[in-house]
Image (cartoon, helix red, strand yellow):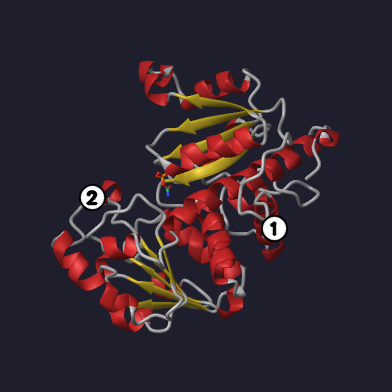
Amino acid sequence: MHLAALHTPSQIQLNKDGNLKHFITIEGLSKETLTKILDTAHSFINDQNQLVTNNLLEGRTVMNLFFENSTRTRTTFEAAAKRLSANVLNIDIARSSTSKGETLRDTLWNLEAMAADVFVVRHSSSGAAHFIAETVCPHVAIINAGDGRHAHPTQAMLDMLTIRRETKKKFEDISIAIIGDIKHSRVARSDIAALQTLGCQDIRVVAPNTLLPHGFEHYGEGVRLFNKMDEAIQDCDVIITLRIQNERIDSPALSSQAEFYKMYGLNQERLALAKPDCIVMHPGPMNRGVEIDSSIADGDQSVILHQVTNGIAVRMAVLALSMQGQLQEKGLLEAIAV
Ligand code: CP
């Protein structure tokens, strides 16, 4: 994939009116845009904490294109699209003609010809969603559902919605620790970008040196690095634990999973160092007994399953807003009003 000649992802995400057209990455989006996504997601949850259903995307077609495995993201995108009354097609990539040598471009052009309005794309190559949005199917709204170790923007937004709803604090006033395999994590990268944009001043990144990306010390405003877990967790409002992304690691980054748990696993003793009302988050999939103890994953401070539900609201918001941008481009805006 040749990305050198492409615009930056942030340049192609908004249309000329400043509305979301594609959702590729958090980087480059303003606080206003992120807040609009959060507010729209919030509007899809009623006073009884239930997700609403409406017909905003009636007659529109959302295609899920997952070139990499997923439980939460694929299913919650499907649930979100159905709650907006869209047609949803889950393309079975493993059984598609890509296995017979058809190029990605040809596969996508054929799917576009089947009247696709939105492609939700997960791919193991960093830059895949951007490449599709800019060079293959610019007239379809492209939503990045995770590309390599680059970005997972809807995960970041559901994490932000969860933090906002659960802590009821301003992002400016929150101390957050992100613990684990930062180097290979698209979630960590997107979460940090979203937290910085929303004004968080105290982002503590906790990992052994082997699981930190090169140059991370220059990551930017509000970010501090810690090698020692106990120091990092002190008085935190939010802890996000991350899985070790073995599928993206070429050479051993750890002596053993048991050693990782001893040094960086979140257990009761460590959680007690955070604020008493600290919430515990994990994007999943979760490895119990490696990055997190089961008693915490299932405990009172865990909001891990709330993240999943919030994921539906956020994905409804991103689908509705990006479709609004696409329809605006095509002069069909009267069809939808969010
Ligand atoms: N958090 C997340 O992306 O989970 P899935 O891989 O199950 O979609």
Residue beneath disc 2: 250
Residue beneath disc 1: 39
Residue at image coords 23%, 60%: 290
Q: Earlier in the sequence, mark 1 or mark 2?
A: 1
Task: Give percent across and percent down for residue 29.
Answer: 65, 58
- Does the CB distance between marks 1 and 2 fall below 8 Å? no
Residue at image coords 67%, 65%: 31
What amino acid type should be assigned to the residue bearing mark 1?
Answer: Asp
Question: Residue 103 is drawn in which quadrant?
Answer: top left
Q: Is residue 314 left or right of residue 250?
A: right
Q: Is residue 92 left or right of residue 214?
A: right
Question: Residue 179 is drawn in which quadrant?
Answer: bottom left
- 10 Å crowding of disc 1: few (<14), some (14-19), many (20+): some
Q: Is residue 102 left or right of residue 214?
A: right
| Count of marks overlaid on the render | 2
Q: Nearer the viewer, residue 143 or 173?
A: 173
Q: In this view, does 257 lie to the left or right of 48?
A: left
